[in-house]
Image (cartoon, rainbow, N blue to C red):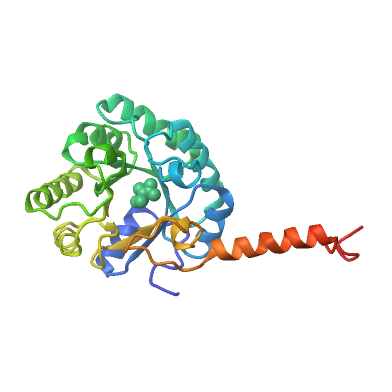
Amino acid sequence: MSTKFSDIRRVTTHQLHAMKEAGEKISMLTAYDYSMAKIIDAAGIDVILVGDSASNVMAGNETTLPITLDHMIYHATSVVKAAERALIVVDIPFGSYQGSSTAALKSAIRIMKESGAHSVKMEGGLEIKDSVERVLSAGVPVMGHLGLTPQSIYKFGTYSVRAREEAEANKLIEDAVALEAMGCFAIVIEKVPAELTRQVAEKLAIPIIGIGAGPYADGQVLVVHDMLGINKEFNPRFLRRYADLHTSITQAVQGYVTDVKSGSFPDKKESY
Ligand code: KIV
């Protein structure tokens, strides 16, 4: 699809602001490895998130909590090598920024220096103000993340929709305003009512990227394995599947097994 911003050589945080101003929606997907990042970058994605969802998707953990800073840097380094156009955002993992702005700064600097990524993402609002400001003070762009923040899953107890109640919705708006004032370049808002997303997106000048947050966000993000239908077990209402790779891969592997067992692979043309 050709858009005003489709021919830019490298997406920057400034271009994301310009997209919001121009009313062009921002596309964002996760990636954790070189091969996938290469495909989605060439397909025209604006932002690649090296999400700590790698903990679930790549490592098979139940939550995002176990993934380490070293793991995130490993994934980010592979993605950076592949992506020529997209802006790359890397999640700072659980335990690497909460409670200490010095730890936050050290973690962000390691991510930027060792992986070559362009920005970091942190979950939370006013409670992580010191960490966000310290990282920003080093010149590292920060994306915020509010609503259902998976690093706090044991506090929430469930993955259900957040901020349905007025008090939590008001706190989310207050946090979003504060993150913008601190200097964040964008905010992910996860699994909240669409009307709340509309209010936040209208109130803030910085882009709001939604996941399970309705159509009024300035952009959308999905976990790439979910939207490609690799993972069959995860079926939230907000997920639209653009492929059924679980079936395609299963059929391809079954075909390979059959051909190897029958001796029809390799044939003469596939041999030296
Ligand atoms: O880690 C991740 O994939 C994320 C998205 C769900 C926004 O944070």
Q: Quadrant of the N terminus?
A: bottom left
Residue at the extreme bottom of the image, as rendered: 2
Image coordinates for residue 260, horizontal then vertical, percent:
80, 58
Which residue is painted at 20% across and 64% down in the image?
Answer: 194
Which residue is painted at 43% across and 37% down in the image?
Answer: 112
Q: In the displayed structure, does residue 185 sit left or right of residue 251?
A: left
Residue 258 figure quarter: bottom right
Image coordinates for residue 14, horizontal then vertical, percent:
32, 55
Q: Is residue 161 above or below residue 179?
A: below
Q: Nearer the viewer, residue 249 or 198?
A: 249
Residue 203 figure quarter: bottom left
Q: Nearer the viewer, residue 199 or 82?
A: 199
Image coordinates for residue 272, horizontal then vertical, percent:
92, 57
Image coordinates for residue 189, horizontal then vertical, percent:
25, 53
Which residue is painted at 83% across and 62% down in the image?
Answer: 262
Which residue is painted at 50% across and 45% down in the image?
Answer: 58
Q: In the displayed structure, does residue 267 sit left or right of residue 4?
A: right
Q: Is residue 71 above or below residue 202?
A: above
